[in-house]
Amino acid sequence: MVAGFPPEVAAVAVLWTAAKAAGVPRPLEDFLKCSKAEERRVRRVAWRLNEAVKQSRRPSIEDYVKTLAARVNLPAAVVKAAVELLEKNKRVLAGKNPWVSAAATLWLASLKKLGLLKALAEAAGTTTASIRNAANRMRV
């Protein structure tokens, strides 16, 4: 994460980020007074640290599937089939809206019931067309 940066830059970035997270933010200049680190490099490392924290907080696509299934009251067998379908189509769905992807896999796993499509779209906060398009991209 901080490879290629000197240890003093990483240390200052960690301290600065930790102070913000603890609810006692301090100006970066206060930390730079005690170090030879450059401000630009410290800011870059701190940004990388924040991005890593954000990445670790993101729910998995399986969590989206389970949440949508609970909202629409789908049985566990459909959820299991949808998760298996997701595993097969991870590349196709990479970078797409996770709510749409989850809804599309649930719809395909439930054998394309039309009434369910509308309920899934409403529960996911999206349109039926986007779910249909995502479903068309997937291999069943």
Image (tube, helix red, strand yellow):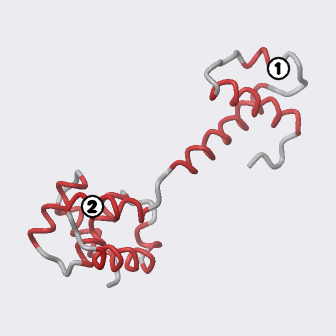
- Above or below, 38 relative to 130: above
Q: In which quarter of the image is residue 51?
A: top right
Q: Which of 84 and 36 is in front in this view?
A: 84
As drawn, the label of residue 61 is: none
Q: Which residue is drawn at 45% across and 77% down?
A: 87
Q: Which of 125 and 40 is in front in this view?
A: 125
- Above or below, 59 relative to 26: below
Nearest-to-viewer mark from 2 and 1: 2
Q: Position of residue 84 (x, y in %)?
A: 40, 79
Task: Identify the residue under disc 2.
Answer: 70
Crowding at mark 1 (Cα within 10 Å: few <14, some 14-19, many 20+): some
Real-space Cα distance between discs 2 and 1?
50 Å
Task: Identify the residue under disc 1.
Answer: 32
Residue type of the residue flagged with mark 2: Ala
Crowding at mark 2 (Cα within 10 Å: few <14, some 14-19, many 20+): some
Local SS, label 1? helix
Q: Which of 53 and 42 is in front in this view?
A: 53
Q: Which residue is drawn at 41% across and 60% down?
A: 63
Q: In which quarter of the image is residue 117?
A: bottom left
| For marks 2 and 1 on the same chain, the one whose residue lies earlier in the sequence | 1
Q: Residue at x 32, y 85 (%)?
A: 140
Q: Residue at x 33, y 80 (%)?
A: 81
Q: Is residue 123 left or right of residue 43?
A: left
Residue type of the residue flagged with mark 1: Leu
Q: Position of residue 123 (x, y in %)?
A: 21, 55
Q: Where is residue 30 in the image (x, y as percent from the top left)?
A: 78, 14
Q: Is residue 73 left or right of residue 102?
A: left
**Do residues under tags 2 and 1 come within 8 Å of each other at their CB atoms?**
no
